[in-house]
Image: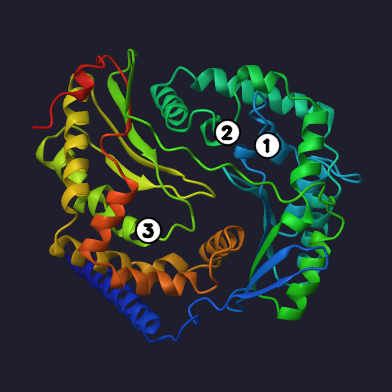
Amino acid sequence: MDAGRQHRRRDCDMRSKFILMALAAALLAVAALPARAILPIQQWQTSSGARVYFVENHELPMLDISLEFPAGSAYDAKGKSGVAGMTNRLVRTGTRDMNENDIARRLADVGAILSGRFDTDRAGLSLRTLSSDKERREALGIFARILQQPVFPQDVLEREKGRLIGNLKEIDSRPGTIVSLAFYRLVYGDHPYGMRASGDVESVNKIGRDDVVEFHRRHYAAQNSVLALVGDVTRAEAEAIAEQVTRGLPEPQTAQPSLQPVAELAKGVERTIAHPALQAHIMIGAPGISRDDRDYIPLYVGNFILGGGGFSSRITDEIRSKRGLAYSVTSYFHPLQQQGPFVVSLQTQRGQAGEAVGVVHKMLREFVKSGPTEQELHAAKQNIVGGFPLRIDSNRKIHEYLAVIGFYRLPLSYLEDFVQKVERVTVSDIRDAFRRRIDPERMVTVVVGPESSKSANAGGN
């Protein structure tokens, strides 16, 4: 080996050792911190009723800020899916004194980044800006006007509708789209969680400017909003920023909107949809849990062992490593305001779909019946707790957690509690939680591919 290569290898070894030492130090620091010291969250309300969550951090000259509302796709009216998403797209495309090009240019001039935030439950805007006085003032002034003075230009609405419809037409024949749409409709029926977040071609075509204006008026009220701030500002500066951003938002017309509970599945449902794709796309699942569910931690740890822990999980080991039925398979709980889904998702060769589905169902029955082993639980805890520092190693990650904690009204000590609760989970906790929440005989199974419904229940022995 030449001297240059040896030198590079020594450098690589030294960097690897440094990274491991830094991670070990971070873990020790986390373990030594007192309660609520990992993420010292400050919380208050603005004069307009917005709830504010703030973490002061002067390590970088940056500020991350978001304002979110209960205005996700689940709040679309029946027959008008897509209005919530279109409102979130258009709210940042023009104010009384700026068009979208002005907004983009002025934010770029101060190095700020504006983005939309939209999912099933939540919608809003986020901003990343330098914390220096001049740049921060300009960026926050623009951010406030976008939130308080949107004009929803008709020409931009028509343009965005055209773009969205073109995209929907392109992806609607893809097996991944087909399996997801069918799965959510079967799991949730008439519940808003079963609606397509983007809308479909027919519903998007019908969206008018009045629909967007009305949705914004009803759902983007300050009293229902959550403001999350992380970065290089003081508490006094954060209070002034919160008032600046939330004043002038729409007055609430009604009480904060709520979502109806999700109905349990009465029985198992199987659906096979013919498609000429080379691989069969498969989703198996049922309604799972809400964000504040008492079983969240044991289900999270249990699912890490079952199918969420990558190559070390049971389903991946059986489906991928032992049987070679799929390159990638995963399972997850997606907690929402109401019961978000529990999902097992995979792709396999067209002729193997029935066997793969059978194996997954068999493993679900076994896991719900017996739970994990002590050895599996110990390994999962080491992995989850050991990786915890990486969850909060940047302002951006902290900000994401802060927004979730605020929106779902989780305890301010949520992250500290998370580690402690994971460490306390037992095998019986996981087994009991899965028995309460997952019924293997009442699952939705959707296969997009050439397999028949009968073959989709075969295999697994």
Q: Residue at x 53, y 66 (%)?
A: 398
Mark 2: few/some/many CA within 10 Å (<14, 14-19, 20+): many
- Measure how far apart labels 1 and 3 are at the Cα level: 31 Å
Of badges 3 and 2, the one in the foreground is: 3
Residue 197, numbered label: 2
Q: Earlier in the sequence, mark 1 or mark 3?
A: 1
Q: Earlier in the sequence, mark 3 or mark 2?
A: 2
Of badges 1 and 3, the one in the foreground is: 3
Residue furthest right in the image: 97
Instruction: Give whichever of 100, 340 is nearer the camera.
Output: 340
Q: Position of residue 25 (x, y in %)?
A: 35, 82
Residue 259 in the image: above or below residue 356: below
Residue 150 in the image: above or below residue 355: below
- Measure how far apart labels 2 and 1 are at the Cα level: 8 Å
* Residue 308 visible in the shown view: no
Q: Residue at x 70, y 76 (%)?
A: 233
Residue 199 in the image: above or below residue 438: above
Q: Which residue is mark 3?
A: 295
Instruction: Give whichever of 81, 32 is nearer the camera.
Output: 81
- Measure how far apart labels 3 and 2 are at the Cα level: 27 Å
Q: Amino acid at mark 2?
A: Ala
Element carrying mark 2? loop
Whether pointer 2 and pointer 1 mark residues with C-beta atoms closer than 8 Å, the reply is yes
Element carrying mark 1? helix
Name the side, left or right, on which 459 lies relative to 41. left
Instruction: Give whichever of 294, 331 is nearer the camera.
Output: 294
Q: Which residue is mark 1?
A: 84
Q: Position of residue 86 (x, y in %)?
A: 69, 34
Q: Amino acid at mark 3?
A: Asp
Q: Earlier in the sequence, mark 2 or mark 1?
A: 1
Q: Position of residue 420 (x, y in %)?
A: 36, 75
Q: Residue at x 72, y 55 (%)?
A: 224
